[in-house]
Structures are given as C-alpha cells and as structure tokens.
Amino acid sequence: MADKEGNSGLLASDFTEQRNDALREGVKGLFLINGGGAVAMLAFLQAIWKDQPQLAKPVIECISIFAFGLFLAGLVQFFRYHASFNFQSGRSRAFRVYRCLYLGVAYSSLVAFFVSTLVVIAGAWCSLR
C-alpha cells in the first residue's frame, strides 16, 4: 500500500510511465514542428529565391532558428538521461540541475518555433512595403 499514490488505485510506477510517455510524445512534437517548419521554409526559399530576393533573408533566418530548435529538441533526452541517472544515484543536486536543463531546452525549442514563425511573418510583412 506504500507504493500507491492517493486513492486512485494507480501505482507510482504508473504515474512515472505516464510522464515518460508524455515527454516522449512532446519531444516527437518538437522534432515535428521544428523539422517540418525547416523543410517547409526550404521549399519556400527555393520558390522565392529568384523572384523575391528581399524575402530570402528572413526565410534563411527562419530556417536557422528552426534548426536551432531541432538541436534543442535533441538535447532534451540527453539531459533527461543524466537527470534520471543522478536521481537513481542519489545525487539530488545534479538531478535538479539536469531536470532544469531538460525542461529548459524543451521549452526553448518551443520558443524557437514561435520566434522563427514570427521572423518569417515579419519578413513577409516588411517585404510588402
């Protein structure tokens, strides 16, 4: 009974597995939105390269931010592994540091998607003038 969490009837390992699944799916989503955005912008860049060169610069900036978001998404599992390892080893300070790192890079990857989208929208807006 000590292994139960609350009165829900679920074991602590069930909640851990749910969190693991949620984080795995979240990282897949980060790869999908940043990778998909980069591929879409590469196709868009090819279409505008000759006809609208003034729009090419913000699109290239957008692609680089998407690529940085992909890099950050890749770091999530790296830091998460180290957080888990340190937690199991009883090093709570190192665990907290790595936990903050993996959460930080996950949120930063999401912010990279948002910023890159704003960059290309602002570039398109400015090129209309």
Image: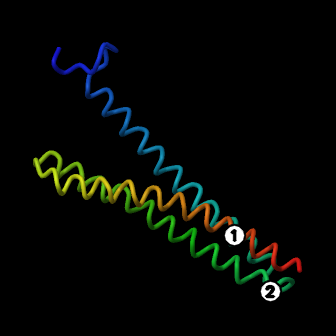
In the image, residue 33 above or below residue 23: below
- Toward the viewer: 69 or 94? 94
Between 47 and 19, the one nearer to me in the picture = 19
Instruction: Relative to 3, say whether 94 is above or below.
Output: below
Question: Is residue 42 rendered to the left or right of residue 129?
Answer: left
Q: Is residue 88 left or right of residue 14?
A: left
Q: How is the image coloured?
A: rainbow
Identify whether 98 is placed above or below 56: above
Reading the image, the residue beneath label 2 is 53
Residue name at image x 36 percent, y 40 percent: 20
- Residue 66, position in %: x, y? 57, 68
Query: Mark 2: few, some, or many residues within 10 Å (few <14, many ≥20)?
Result: few
Mark linked to residue 41: 1
Give the left or right position of residue 114, taking residue 89 as reference: right
Mark 1 surroundings: few (<14), some (14-19) or many (≥20) residues within 10 A: many
Q: Tell me where residue 7 appears, x and y as whole percent.
A: 31, 13
Image location of residue 47, percent across then percent down:
80, 75
- Under mark 2, the amino acid is Pro
Q: In which quarter of the image is residue 41?
A: bottom right
Q: Which of the image's four quarters has the N terminus?
A: top left
Q: Amino acid type of disc 1?
A: Met
Q: Do the residues labelled 1 and 2 touch (CB within 8 Å)?
A: no
Q: Where is residue 92 in the image (x, y as percent from the top left)?
A: 15, 50
Given the current orientation, which residue lies at the most extreme left position? 90
